[in-house]
Amino acid sequence: MSMRPSKMAIAYDFDGTLAPGNMQEHEFIPELGIGNKEFWMEANQLAAKNDMDGILAYMQLMLNKAREANISIKRESFENYGKSIRFFDGVESYFDRINEYAKAKNLIIEHYIISSGLREFVSGTSIAKYFKRIFASGFKYNDEGIAEWPAVAINYTNKTQYLYRINKGIYNSWDDTLINKYVPDHLRPIPFSDMIYIGDGETDVPAMKMIKYREGTAIAVYNPEIRHSGSGTSTSREICLELIKDNRADYIAPADYREGKTLDTILKRLIDRIAAEHELNDIKLNQISNLYDM
């Protein structure tokens, strides 16, 4: 019997990975009556002026702008914005398909979000039900459900800690005791070698580098409609090629999740490899067990 559970994990960035652009741009920012560029420029200025983390800056600006425009900042209102998010081709049917493929290989996939975007927005999407945990920035709410303070701010560098949380089976953002405690690899729920990280570019580099270093797999995806960098908020193919060149990603693919497309093929071959490694490990353990029975 294998010492490792027959499960694996796929962790996804959200903006530019599962959906084009930034999630706030689909409906929230337009309701403020300002342009996307204007909002993000003001957020960057707020961060620079106050020597402030960029994620905390945009979260505070969201609350300030919403109050000025008399727009609800309740949790349920933020979740409703998730309903307007448009995904890349194939995303909404992808999870059932890939889960079935893995099941046929005697594997269970746990899906996770690790995003600088808002967990409330992701929770309101049609695909939220597929994630074991949504690790994303989020607000603290008062007793009336009104956002009053940032609770979690996930930037591009601290994304890596959430890969460790998945590895160790820590399904929250607040428990720092276990994450710093030594746990032998064979006792961790999901080894890094059984993990895949899918991101869309430079903000995912630390997570990609870490997962590769720990023998997991990093995939960089790009918006197939963007040919060159600087032409949108999603990543272009040329940026992803640089990630391959710099050994920061193992594979690149268009963010097209339909069956038979490049990303689908890569993921299925990686599932095949993980399943084969589990099977070989089972054979080895059985052979060792038989030696002791002789």
Image: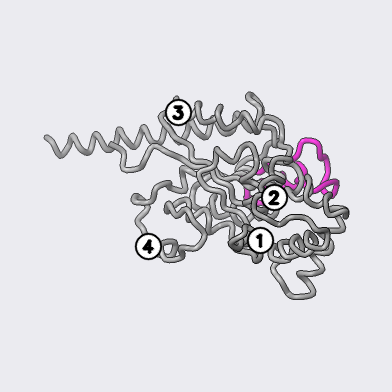
Question: Pointer 1: what residue?
Answer: 147
In front of the other: 99 or 243: 99
Q: CA distance from mark 3 to mark 2?
A: 36 Å
Task: Please identify the residue farthest to the bottom as the structure is shown.
Answer: 50
Dot 3 crowding, Cα within 10 Å, few <14, some 14–19, many 20+ = some
Real-space Cα separation, disc 4 to disc 1, in angstroms: 36 Å
Q: Nearer the viewer, mark 4 or mark 3?
A: 3
Residue that numbered label 2 is attached to: 77
Q: Residue at x 71, y 57 (%)?
A: 73
x and y percentages locating residue 61 in the rendered image: 77, 64
Q: Nearer the viewer, residue 221 or 258?
A: 258
Q: Residue at x 34, y 37 (%)?
A: 281
Residue 237's x, y, as percent?
A: 76, 41
What is the distance, in whole Å, between disc 4 and disc 3 at their CAs?
31 Å
- Tell me the residue at 60%/63% (across/down): 142
Tag 1 or tag 4, which sits nearer the N-term?
1
Q: Which residue position holds label 3?
A: 103
Number of numbered discs present? 4
Q: Earlier in the sequence, mark 2 or mark 1?
A: 2
User: Which of the marked residues, 4 or 3, is nearer the chain's N terminus?
Assistant: 3
Q: Which one is closest to the eye, mark 4 or mark 1?
A: 1
The answer to whether marks 3 and 2 mark residues whose Cβ atoms lie closer than 8 Å is: no
Instruction: Please give the name of the residue rendered at 17% of the width and 37% of the height, measured from the top-left corner.
Output: 291
Residue bearing the label numbered 4: 182
